[in-house]
Image: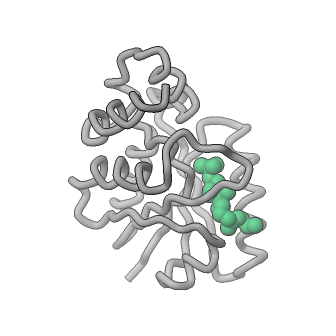
Amino acid sequence: MNTALFPGSFDPVTAGHLDIVERAAAIFDRVIVCVMVNAEKHPMFSLEERLRFLRDSIAHIPNASADACGGLLVDFARQHDARTLVKGARGCADFENELQMAQINRGLWPALDTVILPAKSEHLHISSTMVREMLRYRQPLDRCVPAGGLAAIRSAAEGKV
Ligand code: PNS
């Protein structure tokens, strides 16, 4: 079975993330979306909340699942026998960052490769940072966040803004 991992902070999941999961699920036998700890970031939502939003958002994709990991990504990949990481890139800045991460991860486990999918044009302006800002100002999020996760994200944000 050809398993791919889609790692990220997902704070929270966006419509762009969902698009990457759907496209990866059409390429690979199985996709595991992995909510990771990014030591550089202070997330708005807990690991458990981010995982729940993701599960609600990808429930319609039969070969995709979501999990959480507080450790090293390559260890998680080994445990799940996943040899491919999938990442999305909206532009040069994302691509450069992902290129660097791909080299680091391959250095840690040479069997692990990274596939970078270009974001669709309608998602180029969407980021988790922008979604958090929209939540703070209680702005409509219908096109920015997956329909399946929207209600839970909005209600969880109410206690934090
Ligand atoms: O969505 P993000 O924040 O850009 O994702 C970055 C993330 C979480 C995928 C990256 O920070 C990560 O893989 N963290 C887990 C620890 C790890 O394996 N780091 C890379 C080698 S030191």
- Quadrant in which the N terminus is drawn: bottom left
Q: How many numbered marks have been drawn onto this rendered protein structure?
A: 0
Q: Position of residue 3 (x, y in %)?
A: 43, 75
Write down which quadrant ligand 1 falls in: bottom right
Q: Is residue 107 left or right of residue 43?
A: right
Q: Is residue 16 left or right of residue 53?
A: right
Q: Residue at x 73, y 59 (%)?
A: 101
Q: Residue at x 62, y 65 (%)?
A: 114
Q: Position of residue 11 (x, y in %)?
A: 51, 43
Q: Residue at x 27, y 34 (%)?
A: 151
Q: Quadrant of residue 85?
A: bottom right
Query: Height in image: 135 above or below 37?
Result: above
Query: Height in image: 89 above or below 52?
Result: above
Q: Position of residue 106 (x, y in %)?
A: 72, 73
Query: Height in image: 97 above or below 133?
Result: below
Name of the residue lying farthest toward the front = 159
Q: Quadrant of residue 51?
A: bottom left
Q: Position of residue 143 (x, y in %)?
A: 35, 25
Q: Is residue 158 left or right of residue 131?
A: left
The colour scheme used here is one colour
- 41 or 117, which lies in front? 41
Q: Residue at x 47, y 81 (%)?
A: 80
